[in-house]
């Protein structure tokens, strides 16, 4: 299996020569990366090699431990997604749902406009003013923007609290850490670049206004107990403890991403159950940002309603990428049904251009992870235990 795993890593690196976004993280032998750059294997050869490698993965022994069984399934699933990505790079056109199934091992549900209307009606009753609802909501949100001069302070406090809560339940490797950079001109709002050695670089995009709720969202999602913890635990438990070299590389367009994004989003609820998020935002983050703490409960209520509109983004992406609507119509859909500002909606369409059906990993991923963890957990502490077990295992989305 170790030989198969090594060949898998080298194939992922080979695809990366044709797709600059494909290799999200790599901390394996530098010589393997140099070899991939030197060889520049043709796509057809990569696809043939992937087919051959899938066929060579052995069936699970009769009395395999669960982790070994998951390893075998993981490699098959990841290689299948690699093969699909190669076909896309060769020019094969897949529908949105065909693509998400091939790359992420699942398909997001379809929702008509009527699915979102009840939530929009509820939001409308809570947002003051006249005129289009999206404009009213955008005007209301301006009261909750974190000013540039306070941004670092607010994020530092959010990160410290997310880390404190995570360390109460998760044993992290000694020396783990990350640094934060503030950047511009990106199609995403935040990104974790895992470097290996339990180290991440987290970038926060400041192109658009950053609202107070993004502090915990980004601190948890990109850091604790999200992407940073996920990658650190994989490196500690699977790469270092077991020598499974396939986890030194992370191909972005693969089933692994649904687990990564799903756990990162669900991790916010795990870290801040019940009313604990409201209490921390009201008592610590709002004052640090110079905002009125008495407004925190009302803002949270609206934010929870907005979260129920997350699947509107999937519908916009599906229709846009299949050619049913153009960029302008996709942005208008996001304004109308996802309650985004026009600038945020335009930024999101640029995300669609680059990452395509990847959008399902955030909301569907969270829902699948939440259902899986909570079906296996009992008491609140059990939820942490199942969550951490999932973080440190090579489970595929279809096995959730």
Image: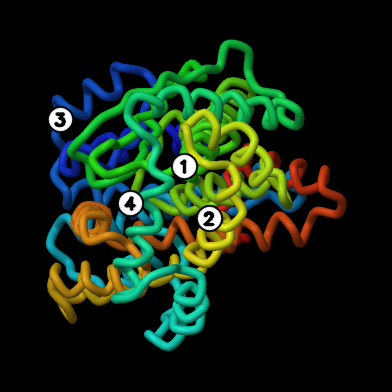
The label on residue 257 is: none
- Mark closer to the chain start, 3 or 1: 3
Tag 4, which secondary structure? helix
**Residues under numbered marks 2 and 1 in contact, where contact means CB atoms less than 8 Å apart:** yes
Tag 1, which secondary structure? loop
Q: Nearer the viewer, residue 277 or 36?
A: 277
Relative horizontal placement of residue 234, taking residue 82 as reference (left or right) = right
In 3D space, how far apart are the residues under numbered discs 4 and 3 (Cα atoms)?
18 Å
In 3D space, how far apart are the residues under numbered discs 2 and 3 (Cα atoms)?
54 Å
Disc 1 target residue: 212
Q: Residue furthest top?
A: 175
Q: Nearer the viewer, mark 4 or mark 2?
A: 2
Q: Which residue is depicted at the point 47% across and 29% down? A: 155
Disc 4 target residue: 82
The label on residue 299 is: 2
Colouring mode (rainbow / by chain / secondary structure / one colour): rainbow
In 3D space, how far apart are the residues under numbered discs 4 and 2 (Cα atoms)?
42 Å
């Amino acid at each position: 299996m170790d030989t198969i795993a090594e060949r898998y890593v080298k194939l992922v690196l080979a695809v990366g020569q044709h797709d600059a976004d494909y290799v999200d993280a790599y901390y394996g032998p530098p010589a393997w990366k140099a070899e991939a750059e030197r060889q520049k294997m043709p796509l057809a050869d990569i696809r043939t090699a992937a087919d051959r490698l899938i066929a060579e993965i052995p069936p699970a022994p009769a009395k395999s431990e669960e982790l070994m069984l998951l390893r075998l399934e993981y490699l098959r699933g990841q290689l299948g997604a690699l093969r699909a990505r190669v076909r896309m790079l060769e020019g094969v056109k897949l529908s949105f749902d065909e693509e998400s199934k091939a790359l992420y091992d699942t398909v997001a549900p379809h929702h008509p406009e009527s699915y979102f209307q009840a939530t929009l009606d509820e939001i409308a009753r809570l947002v003051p003013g006249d005129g289009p609802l999206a404009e009213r909501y955008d005007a209301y949100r301006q009261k909750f923007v974190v000013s540039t001069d306070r941004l670092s302070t607010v994020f530092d406090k959010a990160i410290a609290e997310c880390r404190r809560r995570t360390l109460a339940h998760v044993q992290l490797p000694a020396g783990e850490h990350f640094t934060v950079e503030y950047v511009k001109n990106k199609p995403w709002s935040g990104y974790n670049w895992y470097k290996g050695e339990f180290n991440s670089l987290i970038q926060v995009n400041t192109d658009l206004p950053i609202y107070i709720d993004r502090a915990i969202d980004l601190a948890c999602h990109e850091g604790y107990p999200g992407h940073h913890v996920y990658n650190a635990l994989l490196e500690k438990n699977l790469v270092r403890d077991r020598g499974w070299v396939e986890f030194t590389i992370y191909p972005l367009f693969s089933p692994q991403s649904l687990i990564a994004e799903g756990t990162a989003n669900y991790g916010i609820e795990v870290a801040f159950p019940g009313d604990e998020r409201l209490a921390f935002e009201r008592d610590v983050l709002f004052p640090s940002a110079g905002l009125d703490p008495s407004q925190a409960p009302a803002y949270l209520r609206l934010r929870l309603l907005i979260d129920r509109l997350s699947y509107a983004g999937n519908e916009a992406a599906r229709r846009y990428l299949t050619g049913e609507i153009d960029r302008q119509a996709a942005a208008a859909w996001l304004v109308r049904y996802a309650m985004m500002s026009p600038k945020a909606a335009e930024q999101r369409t640029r995300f669609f251009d680059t990452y395509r059906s990847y959008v399902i990993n955030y909301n569907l991923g969270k829902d699948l992870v939440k259902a899986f963890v909570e079906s296996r957990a009992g008491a609140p502490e059990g939820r942490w235990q199942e969550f951490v077990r999932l973080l440190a295992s090579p489970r595929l989305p279809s096995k959730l």
